[in-house]
Every structure is written in C-alpha cells, then in structure tokens.
Amino acid sequence: MTNHLDSFFAAISDPTRRAVIERLTRGPLPVSDLHAPHDIALPTFLRHLKVLEAAGLVRSEKVGRVRTVHIEAQPLAEAEDWLRRQRQIWEGRLDRLDALARSINSAEKGQQHDN
Amino acid sequence: MTNHLDSFFAAISDPTRRAVIERLTRGPLPVSDLHAPHDIALPTFLRHLKVLEAAGLVRSEKVGRVRTVHIEAQPLAEAEDWLRRQRQIWEGRLDRLDALARSINSAEKGQQHDN
DNA sequence: GAAATAGTTAGCCACATCACTAAGTATCTT
DNA sequence: AAGATACTTAGTGATGTGGCTAACTATTTC
C-alpha cells in the first residue's frame, strides 16, 4: 500500500516546501533565490529541497556553482487525481442517498394518495 | 503560512490513513470494522483515526459502545484546489512559453521572408 | 591568486510520529 | 451479575523531522 503518494503528500505537508512549490510555478530559480524569502538557515532549506526532489516534485541541475531548481508538474496531477476520485465516490454516494430519499418520499406521497 | 493544509496533507501521507479514507468513501463505519483489515494493534489504529479527525477529514459519533466514523469531503476539495491552482499556473506558464516560442519562430520566418 | 559567492557535508539537539503492550472503562448480552 | 464487546488511556521505545552551527568544496570575480 506504500506508493509514491506517501512521499508526495509528506513533501507538501510542510509550509516551507509548499511555498517553494508555489514560487516555482512562476518558473525555475537558483537555490539562493528560492532560499532568500525564508528565515531559516541555508542547510536546513537545502534539506527541504532534497525532500521535494526525492518526492519527484522538483528537479535541479547545477551549472558552475549555481543549482537551478524547477517544478515537475506530473506528480501534482496524480495527487489531484487521487483526491478527486475519493471526493467523487463520496459525492456520488451522497447523490444516490439523495435519490433514495426522494424516491422514498414520492413513494410515501403515492401511498397517501392511495389511502 | 501554516494553515490547515499542513495537517491535511500530513494526514493523507500515511498509507493506513489513506486506506481508511478510501474505505469511508463507501460510507460510514464503526471503528472495529475500519480496523479489521489492518494488521496493527487497535490503539495504534485509533491514533491514526485521531490524526484524521484532528485534520478535519473525518468525524465520529459514539452511540452506546460503538463509535461510527464518517468522511468529511470539504477538506478534500480544498486540497484538490491547491494542487489544481499550482498545476494550472505551471501549465499556463508552459503555454505562454509555447506561445512565445511560436511567435519567435514565426518572427524568424518573417525575417527570412524579408531577407 | 586572494576574496567573495554558492552550495554542500557533518554533527548535534528537541520534538513528533508510529509501533507496541498492559490495563482500564463503559455498554451490551446472557 | 458475570462475561463479552468495543473502545480508551497510559506508558514505552525506535525512528524520522526540522532546526541549528561549524567547517568544507567548488566556482567566479577582482
């Protein structure tokens, strides 16, 4: 039952890492630019990046002394799918319950008319 | 920056807890029924339920000695929204890059014609 | 080639998380 | 009222997570 959703959801459960993702949707950035708005030590920040990269949300390439990070959208879509499936099954169930309630209701009305 | 997405995503980053959610989309169940398919001790399982409940994914009511658990769909929708927003911004960016590439391409063709 | 820049590695600490067992409470069932 | 059922609480231990500082490497820049 352990799949890549584990590490994906764990990765985006941290606010710092979600902020990084949000920033990266505007385009790739070097590590230091990504780090700038965060009030944590660089090594700490770098481990957040590693978590994101390990979860497949992000890739990076180093050119000279600069490492540039960019987002990987596909895992977002997969996670979104899982959530949507669960929600839809649930809502489908509610719809069926609703339909059942309506049919019971109209059946009762029918009975009343028959009486 | 710390909001309820933290606890939500942390909650569904665990396979046991995702399995519980998947099960609950089929309808509410008592704790013991939910626990049955999982090969972990009941107290351990109960803490998973508490995590889900604390994250707002699930509610429960106790009647007599039985506690029945049901899903709460709204947080699913919110998380789905966050993911969708990020993905769309990213994809929108790709679209614009694509458009830019096309316009550069046609401009070059234009130049070639001019030459 | 010395100094600044951009990351990286190593090691430490506090706290959270996930697992367990043992024992307790509250509610049926017989 | 005794026993079974359905949680619930308490306490323990191993491992993971997020934070830090100090020290290091690799690449510009002056």
Image: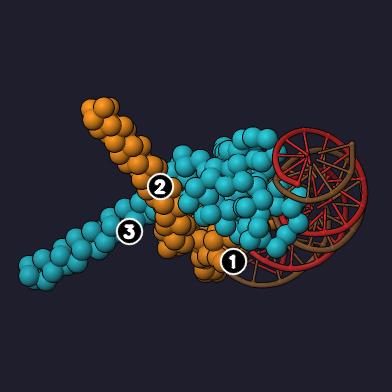
Chain colours: A orange, B cyan, C red, D brown
Q: Report the amino acid beneath label 1.
A: Met
Structural crowding at the residue carrying mark 3, measured as other residues with C-alpha within 10 Å and reported as few (<14), some (14–19) or many (≥20) = some
User: Which-is-in-front pick, marks 2 and 3?
Assistant: 2
Q: Report the amino acid beneath label 3.
A: Leu
Please, what secondary structure does the residue beneath circle 3 have? helix
Residue lying at 76% horizontally and 56% vertically, measured from the top left: B41
Q: Is residue B25 visible?
A: yes
Label 3 sits on residue: B94
Q: Nearer the viewer, residue D13 or B102?
A: D13
Residue lying at 60% horizontally and 66% vertically, measured from the top left: A2
User: Which-is-in-front pick, marks 1 and 2?
Assistant: 2
Q: Chain of mark 1?
A: A
Q: Chain of mark 2?
A: A
Q: Position of residue D4 (x, y in %)?
A: 78, 51
Q: Is residue A28 visible?
A: no
**Which image quadrant is residue A91 in?**
top left
Label 2 sits on residue: A93
Please, what secondary structure does the residue beneath circle 2 have? helix
